[in-house]
């Protein structure tokens, strides 16, 4: 969380992902909830540029810095 804040304050984009191992792939909805909760907590510094997307065993989301 602190690293993402630092990157967004600096003006960089952040890519956050959840990796599903083994049979945990059946809990995709929980992974999506975690990513959205992270985005909500860091909303002060950045906004969601790309909503959570599933790619293989990874679900990722991209955050962009807010313009001042």
Image (tube, helix red, strand yellow):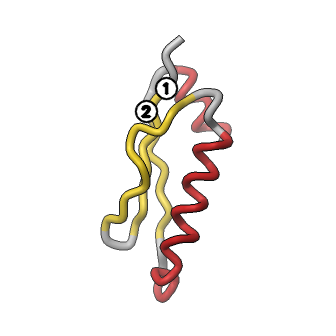
Density class for disc 2 (Cα within 10 Å; few <14, some 14-19, many ≥20) is some
Image spot of residue 43 (x, y percent): 61, 34
Image spot of residue 47 (x, y percent): 51, 33
Whether residues under marks 2 and 1 lie with C-beta atoms below 8 angstroms apart, the answer is yes
What is the quadrant of the C terminus in the image?
Answer: top right
Q: Residue furthest bottom?
A: 23
Q: Dot 1: what SS?
A: strand
Q: Which mark is residue 13?
A: 2
Q: Dot 2: what SS?
A: loop
Image spot of residue 41 (x, y percent): 68, 42
When the figure is inspected, residue 28 is found, relative to residue 7, above or below; the finding is below
Density class for disc 1 (Cα within 10 Å; few <14, some 14-19, many ≥20) is many
When the figure is inspected, residue 30 is found, relative to residue 39, above or below; the finding is below
Relative to residue 21, is residue 57 drawn left or right?
left
Q: Residue at x 42, y 62 (%)?
A: 59
Residue 35 lies in quadrant: bottom right
Q: Residue at x 38, y 73 (%)?
A: 57
Q: Residue furthest top?
A: 68
Image spot of residue 20 (x, y percent): 47, 74
| Comes first in the chain, label 2 or label 1 | 2
Q: Residue at x 43, y 32 (%)?
A: 13
Rounded to the nearest angstrom, the CA distance separating label 2 from label 1 is: 6 Å
Relative to residue 27, is residue 58 drawn left or right?
left
Relative to residue 21, is residue 6 drawn left or right?
right
In the foreground, 8 or 27 = 27
- Which residue was labeled with disc 1? 65
Q: Residue at x 48, y 83 (%)?
A: 26
């Amino acid at each position: 969380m602190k690293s993402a804040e630092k990157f967004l304050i600096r003006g960089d984009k952040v890519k956050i992902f959840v990796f599903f191992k083994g049979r945990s792939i059946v809990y995709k909805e929980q992974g999506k909830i975690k990513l959205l909760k992270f985005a909500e907590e860091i909303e002060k510094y950045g906004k969601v540029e790309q909503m959570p997307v599933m790619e293989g065993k990874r679900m990722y989301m991209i955050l962009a810095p807010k313009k001042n």
